Image (tube, rainbow, N blue to C red):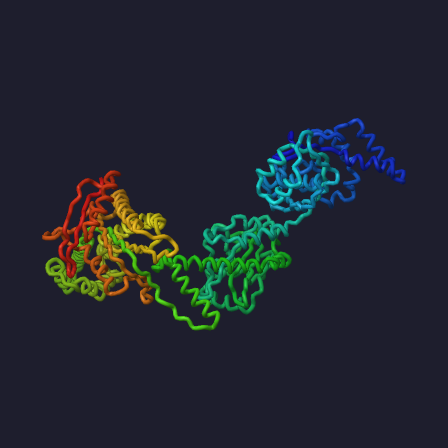
Amino acid sequence: MANLYKKDAPFQVYISFKKYLDVLEHIRYNDRLDYRVNYAKSLIDKTKNFRELRDGFQDISLLEKHDELIKLLLSDLFPTGLTYNEIKAASSPLSNITFNYTERFKNILKDAGKDFEIELRNIDDDEFYVFCCCLILQTYYKRDIKSSLPFYYDIPNRLGVIKHYKITVNSDFTEVYPKEGTKLPSEEVVDALLENLDDYKMWKKYFPSESWILKGFTIISLVDCTSEVALSDLKSSMISIDPENLSPDENLVEIFKSYFDVAELNFGLMLFNKKDQHLEKLPIYENVFTNHILDFWINASDEETRRSTFTNLNHNSKPIVVSNITNLDYDIQSLPSFKILSDNNINSFMVIPIMKENELVAIMEFTSPIVNSFNGLKLKKLEFFSDMILFSINRFSFEKNYQIEAIIQREYTSIHDSVVWKFRNEAEKYFNASLSKKIYTLKQITFKNLTPLFGFSDIHSSSEKRYNFMLEDLNQQIECLHEIFSMLESDTEKYVLAIDIFENELNNEIKADSEQRFQRLLRDEIHPFLQAKLEIKSSSEVKAKIKDYFSQVFTQNDLFYSKRKNLDDSITLVNRKLADVLDESQTKAQQIFPHYYERFKSDGIEHNLYIGQNIAPELHYHSKVVHKLRYWQLKTICNMEREFQNFKKDLPIPLDIASLIFVYNEKIDIRFRMDEKRFDVDGAFNSYYEIIKKRLDKAHVKDSSERITCPGKITIVYFGMENQREYLDYINKLQKKEILQNDIEFLRVEDLQGITGLLALRVSFAK
C-alpha cells in the first residue's frame, strides 16, 4: 500500500482522477454550452501528458509536483468564492492524505502548528478494517448495509483549545474492484460476516490485506461541531460512574474548554450538605477541580453568613456571571472577599447553583484569567446539560450511599456473604407484602445442624503486661509530680501527702478503684493547681517542668500512658496483621464449601466457622468438607504464626502469641439475634459448646500449673481418639512440608467446671 495508509486495510489504494476526467469527457462531447465544452477540453488537454493522473499513483510527492494542475482540474469542485467559508479538501480515499485545501482549511491547519498531524478520532485498527470491508460490500456487492460511521478530526486552534470537526465524504470519484486472483466471498459468507461484525479475524480471512483495489479521490468537508461533541463527551463523562471505582474523568476540564471555547478555564463543584448546612468537596475530584470562589465565599465565611447565603440561594437561585471583574462596583472591589479573585488570577467567572425541587443540591464555578471568558451566552449553553449534571450528582450520591452501606455491612455487622441470601429472601417477602398492602412479620433467621470450627491466636500474657505497664506509667507520673512539688515553695504539702498515700497503695495493696481515685485527684485538684502555676509569675524552670509534665499526660484520662499506649499500638498492629492473613485465607476456604465465618479482635484474633448443608442448600454437602476445612484451619493458623514471626521484631513492645484449635463433633444451631445484630448459638444444649470455648484460653494441663497454650506452639483440644487420629494425619502432612516440628505432646486438659475428658495435642511451629 506504499505510503498512503498507516492502517492495515483490505485495499491497495491509488490516487486517481480518472472518474472526474470521465465527467469532463462527457461535458466535452455532450454539453450544449460552448464555454463549458471548451473549458472541459482545455482541462483534458492539460492532463494528457500526465498519464498517472488517470491511471493512478501511490507516490504522494506527485501531489506536490502537480499541485497547480490539480488545483485547476478541481476548480469546479472548489469554487474560489467559497474558499474562505468552506472547510474542504480533496483526499486519498479513507486515508489522512489530504490536498487542495480551501483557504479556511489552510488557516485552521496553520493555527494547529507545524507539528500537528491530522488523525481520525476514536477508531481503532480493527474497526477501521471492518469499515473498509463494509465499503466493499456496499459498492461492489450492492448491499444496503448503511455502514457509514461518523468520522471526526480533533484540531487545536491557535489558543490550544481543541475544536471538533465532523467529516462528510463525497466518494463519487472512487471505484472499488478485486485484484486479479482474489477469491470473492459467497453471498452466504457475506451474510455470516454481517452477523459477526466483531469477529475481526473472520473478516480478514475473507477480505485479506490489500486484496482489493481502491482508486480515485474523495472530497471531504468539515463542519465545526465542537459544542455538540463536547456536550456529548460531557454527558458521557457525567453518566459513566463505575460503582467499583469512583474515579474522576481527568479530561473533564479540557472538555469544558472546548465547549465554552475558553483556552484557560478552571472548573469547581461542591455538593451541599443539607443536614450540616455546608458545602462538601468531592474527594475523587480534589486534584481535578479548583474551588477558589466556593472555598472562600462559602466555607471561609462566618457561620451566620453561610446560613444566610444558603437560605438566599434556596429562594433566589439565579446564577452569578461576571465577564470582567474590573467592571464591578468599587464597593464590591473593596470587600475582603474580593481579594480571592486577584490572588488566584480570576478575571471572569460564573457561579451556578444546582437546584432540585427548589432545594439546593450543589454549586458549580467556572473561572478564567482571561477577561470576557464568560457571559450570558456561555451561561445559556449550560442549560443543554444542566439536567445531566443533576443526574450525575444524584447517581454519585446513590453510589456513595450504596458503598457506605456496603462498608457498614462489611465492617460493623455480622451478616456474612454466605448467609445473606436467607436475609434477602425474608426481606423480599416483606417487600412484596408491603407492595400488596399486606402485613408480614419477619421470621427469625436460623441455620440448623452445623459443624462448628473454633480457633484463636491470643497475645501471650497481655493482661500481665498491661498491669505492669500501668504500674510503670503511674510511678513515672508520681515521680514527675514529686520533682515539680519539690521545686515549688508552698501550697504543696497536701498534694505531696496524697500522692505518697497513693504510691504506697499502688506498689503494695492496690485496690480495684485505685487508678480511678488517683485520676479524680489529678483532674479535680492537682492539674488545676499546676495550670494556675503556669498562669501566674513562676520561674522559667518551674514552667518548663510543668509543661514537660503535661506533654506526657494522656488528655483523655489525665494519666501518663506511654507504656500502655505502646502496648495498645503493638496489639493493634498484631490484630490487624493476623486478621488480614485470616481474611485473605478465608476467601479460599469459601471455595471448599460456603460457610458462615466470623472473627473478633481483642488481645489477639478469635474466629468461628459453621459448616453445613443448611448454609448452601443448592450444593452437595458431605463429611469430607469438614475434614478439608479443618486442615485449612490448621494450615492457616500456621501461616498466621509465620507472618507474626516475620514482623514481631518491628513492634513497639515485644509480644508473643499462643494459638489453639477446639475440635467439636456435635451439630449445633445458630440464630441471628435481632437485638445484638449478630449470630449466636441457639438453645440450651448448644450453649455447652460456648461454655467450653470461653474456658479453654485459661485452662491448664491436668495435674499441673502449666497452661495448655504456649508461645511458638499450636494446641489442638478434642474429645475422642477419632479426632486425635484425624489431626495427627494433618500434622504429619505439615511436618513433611517443614511447617511443624516433630515434637508432638499428648496432653490431658484439667477438669473444668462441668467439663471433663478433654484431650490435647501440642506441637511446635517450625523456626
Q: How many marks?
A: 0
Query: x%, y% of residue 309?
Result: 50, 66
Q: Is residue 158 visible?
A: no
State the image coordinates of residue 608 (x, y, percent, origin top left): 28, 55
x then y, percent, for residue 458:
23, 52
Q: State left or right for residue 288 relative to residue 169.
A: left
Residue 532, given in percent of the width and then of the height, sits at 24, 63
The answer to which image quadrant residue 331 occupies is bottom right
In the image, residue 450 sits, relative to residue 429, either above or below, namely above
| Quarter of the rendering occupied by the N terminus | top right
Give the side of residue 287 with respect to residue 329, left or right.
Answer: left
In front: 19, or 152? 19
Q: Nearer the viewer, residue 612 or 388?
A: 612
Residue at (54, 60) in percent of width and height: 390
Residue at x 19%, y 53% (from the top left corner): 719
Q: Identify whether 67 is placed above or below 198.
A: above
Residue in the picture at 79% in, 30% down:
47
Q: Is residue 696 left or right of residue 282?
A: left
Q: In the picture provided, is 597 more to the left or to the right than 434? A: left
Residue with the most extreme top position: 49
Q: Give the camera-side residue of 167 and 711.
A: 711
* Front position in the image: 60 or 156: 60
Q: Quadrant of the C terminus?
A: top left
Vertical position of residue 302 compared to residue 638: above or below: below
Residue depicted at x 46% and y 59%: 280
- Can I make out residue 683 in this image? yes
